[in-house]
Image: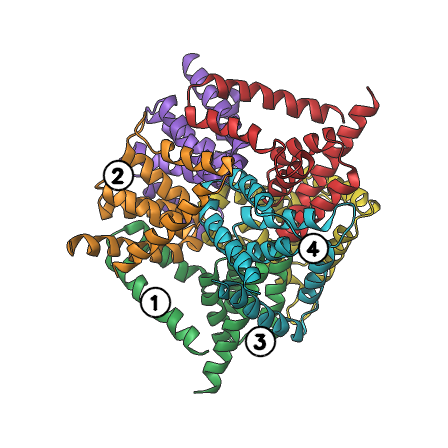
Chain colours: A green, B cyan, C red, D yellow, E purple, F orange
Amino acid sequence: MADLVQEFNDYRQKMNEKLMADNNKVIKRIFNLDTNAYMEGALSVPVKELLGLVASAVLRCDDCVKYHLETCYKEGLTKEQVMEAMSIATLVGGTIVIPHLRRAYEFWEALEQNNESV
Amino acid sequence: MADLVQEFNDYRQKMNEKLMADNNKVIKRIFNLDTNAYMEGALSVPVKELLGLVASAVLRCDDCVKYHLETCYKEGLTKEQVMEAMSIATLVGGTIVIPHLRRAYEFWEALEQNNESV
Amino acid sequence: MADLVQEFNDYRQKMNEKLMADNNKVIKRIFNLDTNAYMEGALSVPVKELLGLVASAVLRCDDCVKYHLETCYKEGLTKEQVMEAMSIATLVGGTIVIPHLRRAYEFWEALEQNNESV
Amino acid sequence: MADLVQEFNDYRQKMNEKLMADNNKVIKRIFNLDTNAYMEGALSVPVKELLGLVASAVLRCDDCVKYHLETCYKEGLTKEQVMEAMSIATLVGGTIVIPHLRRAYEFWEALEQNNESV
Amino acid sequence: MADLVQEFNDYRQKMNEKLMADNNKVIKRIFNLDTNAYMEGALSVPVKELLGLVASAVLRCDDCVKYHLETCYKEGLTKEQVMEAMSIATLVGGTIVIPHLRRAYEFWEALEQNNESV
Amino acid sequence: MADLVQEFNDYRQKMNEKLMADNNKVIKRIFNLDTNAYMEGALSVPVKELLGLVASAVLRCDDCVKYHLETCYKEGLTKEQVMEAMSIATLVGGTIVIPHLRRAYEFWEALEQNNESV
């Protein structure tokens, strides 16, 4: 199941590199903004990552959810905290979020397994 | 093609069990509400399932559409009735719903094939 | 409060007439399709109106909700039936639907008041 | 401008009371869940309110944004923190969020004015 | 009806100035990007404005639609061209777009009236 | 990678034929409208295809994006033009569009490779 993480990151990195090598300035600047927006400010990095996670979940973007789950994991957020954030997303976004919640849970388990096997 | 149904149900059940075993009360209660909302009341179960199907289709959630197609099928709704509901979803939700309509049609055929082979 | 209904219908009718007088064929045909889709077929008119209502509610379009509430009312659907449909919409679409539910409830009351005062 | 807050709260309370007086159990339970989900747990109340705010903003629900802005204000979150959360919402949700950002900013100013005048 | 344009522009400008005076860098940079993205490049300005219009219409943001209608008008696009773009938006986005189409048509008429009265 | 194009077209064609063979008139007429809406009118075919592409991208429908990328390619639009349209979609729709942008870029490369190998 750890492959789930690797596969996601490999494809993401490969295509991001292609998009950056392309010469569209607006896209490059959006990517750049995306990096800056989650840096520490008036809110801490973990809180910002949870905000990104919930925004991604209610907009039902599996890849965005996976990305923020991984950063949440790296920031040391617990499964309980992440699941509380996802529960708010499911309540606000409705039962339509549930299939994404299932895939998010599976991805979080893959992140945990990945780490145990190191 | 019958495997399409089995595969969907297996993954759904496996992950739902994990989510239920997790101790997030909000998620558990949303799941519980989800069961109650479709029970007979002022509206019949088949009508409620069609409402769930159309809500899922316009919000473009393939898994939710599959779930309601299966319950519609079990409730004895005909293909013609289900397609009329899907046509309203496609009209209200726009041509952006069409790819989901294709996958819904494929899933309905799998449900029918599944039954014939029993 | 009855004015809420009149005001909605007047603006809707005025602008629809302008759109029909304009010579865009695609828009005219979409309007035409919109009329046909809710006619009796394998599903009854009231069921189709409920489907239109729920689709409108989860997509959070107040004007579309108002339109279908009025047709539901004319088709003789009860407040209890309409509220059951709206409850499914709120569950599937999430708490984000609640502000629209409040306005829908207000509009339904206006429809009832309108009728009593006749 | 303070009336902006009062007007929002009055309508919201009036219609919520009507919805609660109505006998739809699913809606009542969703309202009840909505209260519980934002209570302190593995995440603090202010963080949960920010999550609700961002979820509301990317789903572009002005009333939901207003509600969470008010709770954020009551929880003592600063304008800078709230604006950081809104900036993430605008980045994730796109420029389509900007009109809602304008109205959110106006509402926050009304909350501040309201408080100063007490 | 010309006031419709003035009112929209006044509020938009007032709040944008407040947002720019606020010190959130991410929001400032998104605003800045928004200006650059519609400048002439491989695609002409009128085509880009039509793209912005259709994106706004299918995402059902009245204020964004108004903004792009005004820029389309200033770029010399005809009502017929704008209505063709809106017809594609209505087809792709579904009948849920129709209420926004009504308001867009009204705003375009206000733009035309505004100009005649100069 | 060229298989990406073939696979998409094969499934799309197979299911569209089934939907057309089915006797739901509303769906048939929506399909028919879909063909007519992109024909030359006050706007050229390439511009209309770009409008369809951007509408599909902000509504985050991968299959719809693929379909319009292919027609854009056949209409002779350059990669630079298509990427400018996609950059507007990403700005308007937010970073949530990025995963779809990655898949769109991959599909465009497949279209180019397909053509080179002929």
- Residue F63 coordinates in the image, percent (x, y): 39, 51
Please give the name of the residue rendered at 60% of the width and 22% of the height, measured from the top-left corner. Answer: C11
- Chain for numbered disc 3: A
Question: Which residue is disc 3 drawn over?
Answer: A78
Structural distance between the alpha carbons of marks 3 and 1: 26 Å
Question: Which residue is disc 4 drawn over?
Answer: D74
Q: Is residue D7 visible?
A: no
Q: Are marks 4 and 1 on the same chain?
A: no
Structural distance between the alpha carbons of marks 2 and 1: 29 Å
Structural distance between the alpha carbons of marks 4 and 3: 27 Å
With E8 as the anchor, is D108 left or right in this view? right
Q: Secondary structure at mark 2?
A: loop
Closer to the camera in the image, B68 or A113: B68
- Label 3 environment density (alpha carbons within 10 Å; few <14, some 14–19, many ≥20): few
Question: Which residue is disc 2 drawn over?
Answer: E43
Closer to the camera in the image, C92 or A61: C92
With C61 as the anchor, is D93 left or right in this view? left
Residue F114 occupies quadrant: bottom left
Question: Which of the labelled discs sits on residue A11, or is there none?
Answer: 1
